[in-house]
Image: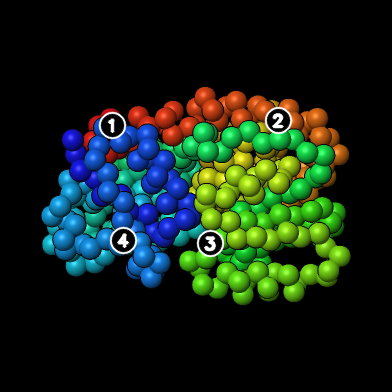
Amino acid sequence: MKKILISPDIPGWVCDSMAKGIIKSLSHKFEFTLKYSDGLAKEYNHEVINWYEDIEKYDIIYIMLPSYIPKGLDDYSKIITSYHGGPGTEGQVEMLMRLGLMRTRMSYVSNQTKERVTGKHKLQLYYTPHGVDDSFFDQKKITGDFVCGYAGWIRYLSDAQKKHRRGFWIVDAWRKDNFLLSIAAGIEINKAIHEDIEKMKNRFSSNMKLKINIYPYEKMPDFYKGISLYLVPDKFAGGPVPVLEAGAMGIPVVCSNAGLCGEIIKNNHNGLLIKDQDEFEKSIVYMKHNPKERIRMGNNLRDYIREYRTWNAVSLYWEKFFLGER
């Protein structure tokens, strides 16, 4: 049984939940150890990768984000990595080129990501779609309140990565319609999170309907239970994994075709796909005033995810990636 060191960046965030889903679905095939790539994790008593020791101990070292592959190693042959599709993806390709690692085994998580990293580069790419733990993200109870949800760093709702994240679309729609906006605002390991929350609250008048909380991963189902609709305005996305988590609980989405959204969302069937900001705002208003349609689309999305996008459903892709098999 191959020994695999799997290394997400930080505890409690997207790659960490992915790593645990991969381990849960493939622990009968591989012997996994989880250590984090970012030294910040050590401050919170989590084990961090030790390159010069671990490179000898494992058959495969899966660094989930390429930017954490260090310079100056004598041996890169055991390292594999993935492109997740965030705004820094092109820079990650160039970094691996500078390290001479273009023949390193790599995976991509969506067709949009593949298009951005191929082209003039000949890459050894494997398709490894995101999955979701449907036993953890279970169906929510439908309530009568209309609440829009967003999960991610709050700074994306201002000017941070504005051209890529387009979080200001959410803010603009919220200002116009004043629906209740619920935000899962990151994790405690981000030391600036409380300051970011205060800045967000201070930006808007007190009559705006806003709920912001910090949710550790184990509490994320509580966040989704409190929303009616999940919003994705991004131009590029590294998933977004919350679409799978919300969808597994029967919550529909209004989204662009970023990341996996363009692959799993069928317009007016299990969500609404939008092309521009005007469509985004009108789609939110439509969902607000058509609760039966929200329920119908949410149930359709839930059915699709539970058949095709659980970790068990996608585990064969990941198994082939780890083994280097087509």
Q: Is residue 109 left or right of residue 306?
A: left
Camera-nearest residue between 143 and 159: 143
Q: Which residue is label 3 attached to?
A: 187
Q: Is residue 219 visible?
A: yes
Camera-nearest residue between 213 and 152: 213
* Real-space Cα separation, disc 2 to disc 4, in angstroms: 41 Å
Residue 290: percent from left, percent from top:
83, 35
* Real-space Cα separation, disc 3 to disc 1, in angstroms: 31 Å
Amino acid type, residue under disc 3 in the picture: Ile
Residue 11: percent from left, percent from top:
43, 58
Say whether disc 2 or disc 4 marks the residue closer to the N-terminus.
4
Quadrant of residue 247 in the image?
top right
Q: Secondary structure at mark 3?
A: loop
Say whether disc 1 or disc 4 marks the residue closer to the N-terminus.
1
Marks 2 and 3: CB-CB under 8 Å?
no
Q: Which residue: 52% across, 65% down?
A: 188
Q: Which residue is label 4 attached to?
A: 47
Q: Which residue: 38% across, 46% down?
A: 19
Q: Is residue 274 left or right of residue 312?
A: right
Marks 3 and 4: CB-CB under 8 Å?
no
Label at residue 28:
1
Q: Is residue 103 visible?
A: no
Residue 174 in the image: above or below residue 229: below
Quadrant of residue 263 in the image?
top right
Q: How many marks?
A: 4
Q: Secondary structure at mark 2?
A: helix
Q: Which residue: 55% across, 30% down?
A: 305
Q: Nearer the viewer, mark 2 or mark 4?
A: 4
Q: Secondary structure at mark 1?
A: loop
Q: Which residue is label 2 attached to?
A: 297
